[in-house]
Image (spheres, rainbow, N blue to C red):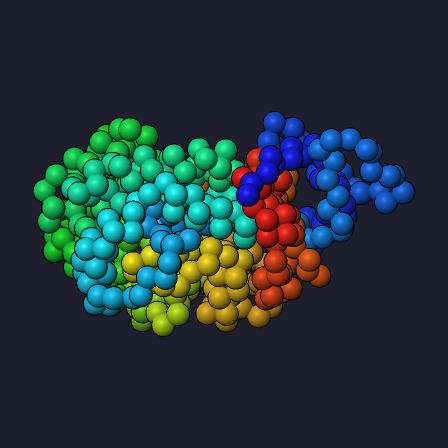
Amino acid sequence: MTHSPETVTVLRNVRPWGGDAADLHVADGRVTAVTPHDPAVPAPAADGVVDGRGLLALPGLVNAHAHVDKSWWGKPWVSYGGEATTQGRIEHERAHRDELGIPGADVTLAVLRELLRHGTTAIRTHVDVDLGLGLRGIEVVREALEAVGGAVHAEIVAFPQDGVLRRPGVLDLLDEAAAAGAEHIGGLDPASIDRDPVGQLDGLFAIAERRGVGIDVHLHDGGALGAFQIELMIERTLRAGLQGKVNVAHGFAVGELPASRQADLVAAMGEAGITMTTVAPIGAAPLPVHALREAGVAVGLGTDGIRDLWSPYGTGDLLALTTQLARLSRFRHDDELVAAARIASSDAARFVGRDVHDLVVGAPADVVLVDAENVPDAVVRAPGRALVVAAGRVVARDGDVLV
């Protein structure tokens, strides 16, 4: 059962980023002031004044790589099947998605509510666009987003999960999606799936230039082959003037390259304004997060699919995934753990089309409260979300989602 979410005017007695107690003042869904909390001043008995109980405050979490159209969350258990390769997963998904009602507004809504439960208030979600679905998946996702009343801010990537050039007509669908408002178009392993990296990337960049959208390419190809494709993206980004609008998702190759080769590629990505998103996968070579950030390559964190036909894993808890990213990156020092939290929140503003996403004046009033001593403690333990505020409304409290 859902309840009407409370509109916040003042979120009292919280510790932004673990600092001194403060009151966050909110109007029209944005932070209008951050003032020191005075415990001697009693809380006014007024609507919209919410007691933060001295809890640690973080910005709403940002899921920079999601697939909210694919999940079977809330349905009876679906056993894993099919081959474990990328092509095998595609074929298995195509064979079984219809019987599970995927994509469907009901399952997508269930995933969005689960994300909110865990404090995610903004997402970049890939949505399948293919010859079987057309653009129906995007319509389904927008319907589910509307059902949560703006509690989840989203940007959509029209995603060609079944390939681009190998399926004639998909480029036209991507162009149609971009014209209809999708903020980004996606690509998938231009070499190993389409077996024509130049052709796929030329097609994607032509649409991006024509429509003014971003590009977000799933790149699973490793080693030299993956690096070669990133180099092709760098060249095209610079030539098209699309700095800051091209993202490499997964990019396992970057973590696999020899040190000198890796350093050169990372530097070139930084110069081209190319970003990266990771799902902190276990078993893959970790991305060199420090080196990427130092080179100016923004790094975003995402859940990937959550309980879908690709994998039964996933809970929607991005803070727990931040713990995993920190461990895989061998982060131990306080400043490293704080950096991990910022990757999952404030630093990810650019992945969801925001100039600022933080606990500061002018930012969207997206706030997550947790019972933690400090930010490193929150990253290491990923405690439950005591309160989630999205666009100035209380949307979840102690695990109860209110939208």
Can you give x and y, in whole percent of width and height, for residue 355 in the image? 50, 36
Q: Quadrant of the N terminus?
A: top right
Res 175 seen here: yes
Where is residue 178, by image quadrant?
A: top left
- Residue at 39%, 63% in the rendered image: 313
- Residue at 43%, 49% in the rendered image: 111
Judged left or right of residue 228, residue 250 is: right
Can you give x and y, in whole percent of width and height, for residue 202 in the image? 17, 42
Q: Nearer the viewer, residue 393 or 217?
A: 393
Res 65 seen here: no
Can you give x and y, in whole percent of width and height, for residue 279 in the image? 40, 59
Judged left or right of residue 371, residue 333 is: left
Q: Nearer the viewer, residue 279 or 4?
A: 4
- Residue at 48%, 61% in the rendered image: 321
- Residue at 59%, 45% in the rendered image: 396
Can you give x and y, in whole percent of width and height, for residue 26 in the image? 67, 32
